[in-house]
Image: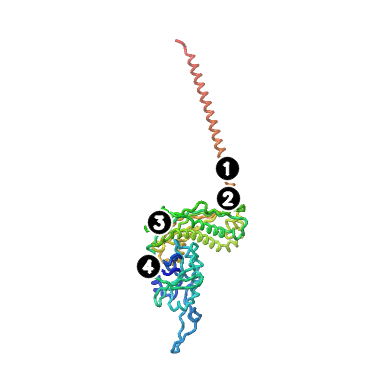
Amino acid sequence: MVKSVIGEETQLKSLENRLFQTSIPAQVGIVVGKLNPNSDRAFVYDLIPTPPTDGGGPPCSLRSSEVGGGGGGGGREKKKKGGSSVEPPPSLSIDADWVAEHARQVSRMLMGGMHVVGVYVWASEASYKATSPSLLSQTVRGVAQATPWYERESDERLLVHISYGPSRWVCRICTVASANMQPCDFKMGKLLSSLQTYQCMYNFEIRLPIFHAVALDSNTFKNVLRLGIDRHAKDLQTAKALIDAKLVTEDQHIHSEGLHKVELLLPFMRDVAPEACSSDNVAGLIIFTGAICASAYLGPKEPVAQAVSDIKADILKSLRSRLDIVCDEAEDKVELTSKNDMDASDDANKSIHQIILHQLRKPYSLHFPRRVLVPWLAGVFICDYLQPLESFEDLKDRCREMMSMESSIESSSILELEKEETTSLVAKSFWDVVCGDSANHLDESKDAKVSARKVDNGRSKTTSFNLVASIFVLLAALIVGWAITVLGSAKPAH
């Protein structure tokens, strides 16, 4: 259980100063940091305010006591001893669903073991106490459900209250399941400057069989690929790691500065589904290939095993994030696609939600968005995913909106370590898989036969030419010899 929390002093104090200058009465946002269930300490790197809702309203505001606040009396008036009445302080009104959606979007952009670890609230002490604890715990629970940690799930999240009357910071540990909130120690220090960076370029090829005897809704791209990623996650956990070309032990610490290169060694043939070797009901195959640039940021007292674990988790989160992005975009186009039923027979024009994989008769390919790295804080990078038709300007707009990045982002500082369209997905039919695309082989054999005929014809022509030339030379030699003999015998004797 977490007992103490350390916050990055530079970032947290900067946010507090901005809040005091704006004089806004209330604000809600998410907490980005690291919460290790194996340790009793948590780290907070930054607090990111939740942007306005789609309607332009604030996600957090003060609720009038006449409407009925939280635990502060719900609009009832309290009387003083002198007989005069005073209104109770207004409570907080929070759009928990909008905060959770913001957390989900930001979670995709975080790398290297960093997570959305909770919620922060900027409000006066009176308004905070007047707010129902159930509303606060509901907000924290919604954020936790929207940003699951697949590699090591924890039931604890942080609730940070920044009070401006009086001015102080209070942190609580919130148990998601029970909604129990306990205070914990909170202090500030220098965290980002001491982080070590580990980076890995992970190349993968995942082959997933498509079966006839399954429900139609289970044979969609989303379900088949999600199942394949989950299966690959189990294999990835057994991978050994080389750091700076050296095999390291789990409890080893690396104190050298600079970027550390990580290489993962996956056991041979571990990603092959066992049912693919024994099933006679294979309809096709999905081949998911690509290269992922993964990163991890490690504190000075953390072992390298934590960096390896964070890199593996970053790889899996990146795969899931790209799948979610493609599916989200497809869902937005479902209504438009359904109106154009004239092209429904063409697989290339269908949404991935409409394609039934085991009914495919032609190869189907899909390019996943590529990951690009954007500088964030003190040498730490975040990421975003660019679709084929998107540009850096789209990326910059998302960073400003989701991460509240006020400074301008230079295009030259954005890193494209993954090549364009390097991650792709191809679905092949049964006959393409088993016969190795026999049509292409037939075409190749035809081309080979034509080429052989051309070569034979060329050789025949060359042979005929050489024979004629030899006969001509022989005849010329005979004529010259005959002429010499005749002319020699015709000379008079002296």
Residue at (59% x, 49% y) in the render: 434
Task: Bin the neighbour count of mark 1 within 10 Å (Cα to Cα): few under 14, some 14-19, many 20 and up.
Answer: few
Q: CA distance from mark 3 to mark 1?
A: 49 Å
Q: Are marks 2 and 1 in contact (CB under 8 Å)?
A: no
- Asked if residue 433 can be seen in this view, the reply is yes
196 w.r.t. 81: above or below: above
Where does residue 256 sit, x and y in percent of width and height?
A: 37, 57
Q: Are marks 4 and 1 in contact (CB under 8 Å)?
A: no
Q: CA distance from mark 2 to mark 3?
A: 40 Å
Residue at (54% x, 28% y) in the render: 468
Residue at (41% x, 75% y) in the render: 163
Q: Are marks 3 and 4 in contact (CB under 8 Å)?
A: no
- Residue sticking out furthest to the top: 494
Q: CA distance from mark 2 to mark 4?
A: 57 Å
Q: Amino acid at mark 1?
A: Ser
Q: CA distance from mark 2 to mark 1?
A: 19 Å
The residue under label 4 is 189
Task: Bin the neighbour count of mark 3 within 10 Å (Cα to Cα): few under 14, some 14-19, many 20 and up.
Answer: some
Residue 344, located in which quarter of the rendered image? bottom right
Secondary element at tag 3: strand
123 w.r.t. 329: above or below: below
Dot 2 or dot 4, earlier in sequence? 4
The residue under label 2 is 433
Q: Quadrant of the C terminus?
A: top left
Where does residue 402 sit, x and y in percent of width and height?
A: 46, 66
Q: CA distance from mark 3 to mark 4?
A: 25 Å
Q: Amino acid at mark 4?
A: Gly
Mark seen at residue 445:
1
- Whether residue 438 sits left or right of residue 291 in the image: it is right
Query: Which of 69/280 is in front?
Result: 280
Q: Nearer the viewer, mark 2 or mark 3?
A: 3
